Image: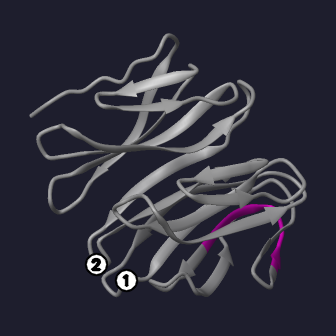
Amino acid sequence: QWAKSIHGPNSDFALIACVDNQGNSYVIGAFQSNTCIFDTDTLNGSGYSTHYLAKYSPSGNIIWAKKTGNSFSLNCNSGIFKLVYDSLSNSLLFAGAVGSNFQLNSTTVTSSPGDMDAIFGKANLNGDVLWYHTITGNGSQSGNTIDFDGAGNVYAIGTSNSAFNVGNDSLQAGVFLIKYDSNGNQILVKKIT
């Protein structure tokens, strides 16, 4: 067992984590400094807070740390809220919300006009995005959770406070469920409440 800290001159947070089948740990968090040190890796901050994804070995050594986005104010709710290890495809599933331009490693996600867009996607174990979808509307949308089944299909749940679009489907405000295949192709979308 092990415990690790990251550090910068201001506040640092670890928010969610998951573990792959080799015992590597993946941690999502944020820091509110110009720089943050992860053992041998250092990330530069931007905006009010900078979000990160870090990978640790089974013995707790840092393998890499990467920026996953930034918030420009205390009230900005963008970020990755759920991270799941998909054992069938040996990958990471993620759900969250994006505002303005959002960086996921080397992939830049541009949100639509409005408050926030939900995001759901899959990344490999190096943190590179394999596919993602944003859910847009006039108000705020958020990706709350994500998981997979025994056939490799991906299930994503989110919320919207206004009418919104999922692919070619238009739905009213509420909680929604989307089913994707393993490659990110939409199979169905349903409004739950």
State the image coordinates of residue 83 (x, y, percent, origin top left): 42, 54
Q: Which residues are magenta?
A: 170-177
| First along the sequence among labels 2 and 1 | 2
Q: Residue furthest top?
A: 9
Q: Is residue 90 at all visible to an observer of this figure?
A: yes
Residue at 62% in and 28% down: 49
Question: Where does the C terminus fall, quadrant-wise?
Answer: bottom right
**Left or right: 45, with 86 as reference point:** right
Q: Secondary structure at mark 2?
A: loop
Within the image, what quadrant is residue 164 found in? bottom right
* Residue type highlighted by circle 2: Leu
State the image coordinates of residue 103 (x, y, percent, origin top left): 63, 51
State the image coordinates of residue 12 (x, y, percent, origin top left): 46, 22
Alpha carbon of mark 2 to alpha carbon of mark 1: how far? 6 Å
**Left or right: 6, with 48 as reference point:** left
Residue at 53% in and 54% down: 105
Residue 153 is covered by the magenta coloring = no
Question: Where does the N terminus fall, quadrant-wise?
Answer: top left
Please tell me the numbered disc located at residue 47: none
Residue at 36% in and 60% down: 126
Please tell me the numbered disc located at residue 152: 1
CB-based contact (under 8 Å), mark 2 and mark 1? yes
Residue on which the image places disc 2: 88
Q: Is residue 98 at all visible to an observer of this figure?
A: no
* Residue type highlighted by circle 1: Gly
